[in-house]
Amino acid sequence: MNGDSEPDDLARALEAALFAATEPMSVQQLRQYVGDRADITSALERLAGDYAGRGINLVERGGRWHFQTAADMAHMLRREKEEPRRLSRAGMETLAIIAYHEPVSRAEIEAIRGVQVAKGTIDVLMEAGWVRPAGRREVPGRPLIYATTPEFLTHFGLESRRDLPGLEDLRAAGLLDPVDLAMEGAMEGLFEREDDDSALENMGEEA
């Protein structure tokens, strides 16, 4: 095998592994198939470029790679009307708080929303695969803290949490209703996670 053919062989091996995978794979997982190669990431990027503009694309979401149907072709594969997953307003607010402030505890979510989180709200988000337990806060009572998952990024088409929209983006897209706009001052904190993180660290927790 000569040096010129080696990159192509690596790309083909990565392509085969990802094609056969049942879920997105990280670079570390791919190493188990193609060996400990320093150029795996660059090979993946080249492969993604090869698939750009085709019926399927190679994409990276939250550090994991997978093939997906091109966005403009997805409608051709739908034989039945898909029933979208519907969340209550409380569920959407809870998911947004977790996404913008993670890791965050139930008490912290309630402090930001100003109301209690109904029993089962976080369970629904975990069943959807969008939220996961992320350990315990090292404060009295050691409450569970929650974070989003790679599936959350994939479902909403985000490469990382840095791609989450800001308040101005949501307003421009018409995603804030009159109630949201009336409460804009209160919601401002929802999108200023960096400033709030330090305050949340010092928040008291119930045992």
Image (cartoon, rainbow, N blue to C red):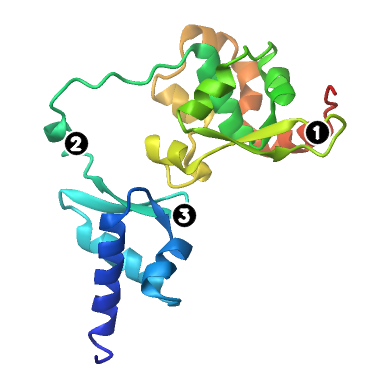
Element type at mark 2: helix
- The Cα atoms of the two marked residues, 3 and 2, are separated by 23 Å
Q: Identify the disc placed on residue 74.
A: 2
Compared to residue 189, the image places residue 18 above or below, namely: below
Q: Please tell me which residue is depicted at 46% across the width and 25% down the height of the picture.
A: 170
Instruction: Identify which amino acid the numbered label 1 is placed on.
Output: Arg
Along the line of sight, which residue is nearer the eye, 159 or 67?
Answer: 67
- The Cα atoms of the two marked residues, 3 and 1, are separated by 29 Å
Quadrant containing the C terminus in the rendered view: top right
Along the line of sight, which residue is nearer the eye, 192 or 79?
Answer: 79
Q: Identify the disc placed on residue 142.
A: 1
Q: Please tell me which residue is depicted at 34% across the width and 64% down the height of the picture.
A: 45
Could you say which quadrant of the image residue 151 lies in? top left
Element type at mark 1: loop
Instruction: Identify which amino acid the numbered label 2 is placed on.
Output: Ala
- The Cα atoms of the two marked residues, 2 and 1, are separated by 44 Å
Instruction: Identify which amino acid the numbered label 3 is placed on.
Output: Gly
Q: Is residue 104 left or right of residue 4?
A: right
Could you say which quadrant of the image residue 107 lies in? top right
